[in-house]
Image (cartoon, rainbow, N blue to C red):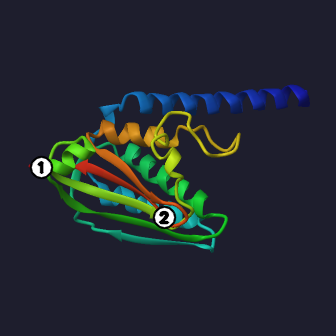
Amino acid sequence: DTLAANDLLRSLKAARRGSRLVNQMLTFSRADTGGFRPTRISEVVEEAVNLIEASLPGNIQIKTSIVTEAGICEADPTQIHQVVMNLCTNAFQALKPRGGVLSINLGQVEIDKKEAVALDVAPGRYIQLVISDNGPGIDPDIQDKIFDPFFTTKRQGEGTGLGLAVVHGIVKGHNGAIRVESTAHQATAFEIYMPLLTA
């Protein structure tokens, strides 16, 4: 009985993991716009920060600069929450061995024509979310691969390699852009741009 119960539990766990994986892959392949609505991004970010703060060890400090009136986007709050949690979790894992600072900044920027071409978005006003850490940085050799599905630097069993691919899929599904700036042994910053909802 116990053996059968254990096998059943393992099967259930595997099925749940598989279900989560499929959902992530679907999110990556096509952003579902069913949950989109006018969303104050600052509220979603603050909610995610509160969750993250509760789980941070003592050797990691969190710094936030969130402009509450940064504006409103047409967005799915659940998907944006997932983006913030994924990027913060990555930063947390990078900082964990030696500690450091995780910074979350939210504001508003104007993207001109030249910058719009570089980011592959339309010019205009955007909400800018920057999640950065002063950890080990990302090796320049792999920076162009980090958004690829199943690419991971984690050991086997520590991740699916879908985290950043899902983040990229969600941001693009919101007509936004994401880029990474990283300096080896100094810092990594993920910049996310999402178009403001104009009246």
Quadrant containing the N terminus is top right
Residue 55 location (% of width, % of height)? 59, 63
Residue 169 at least partly seen: yes
Q: Which residue is mark 2?
A: 187
Looking at the rendering, which quadrant does residue 37 occupy? top left
Dot 2, how many residues are within 10 Å of its Cα: few (below 14), some (14-19), or many (20+)? Answer: some
- Disc 1 marks which residue? 198
* Relative side of 142 to 30, left or right: right
Q: Residue at x 43, y 53 (%)?
A: 84
Q: Is residue 93 left or right of residue 145?
A: right
Which residue is rendered at x = 21% and y = 53% of the image? 126
The answer to the question of whether label 2 and label 1 lie on touching residues, with beta carbons closer than 8 A, is: no
- Distance from disc 2 to disc 1, alpha carbons, whole Å, reads 34 Å
Examine the rendering and report whether any part of residue 38 can be seen.
no
Q: Amino acid at mark 2?
A: Ala
Which secondary structure, mark 2? strand
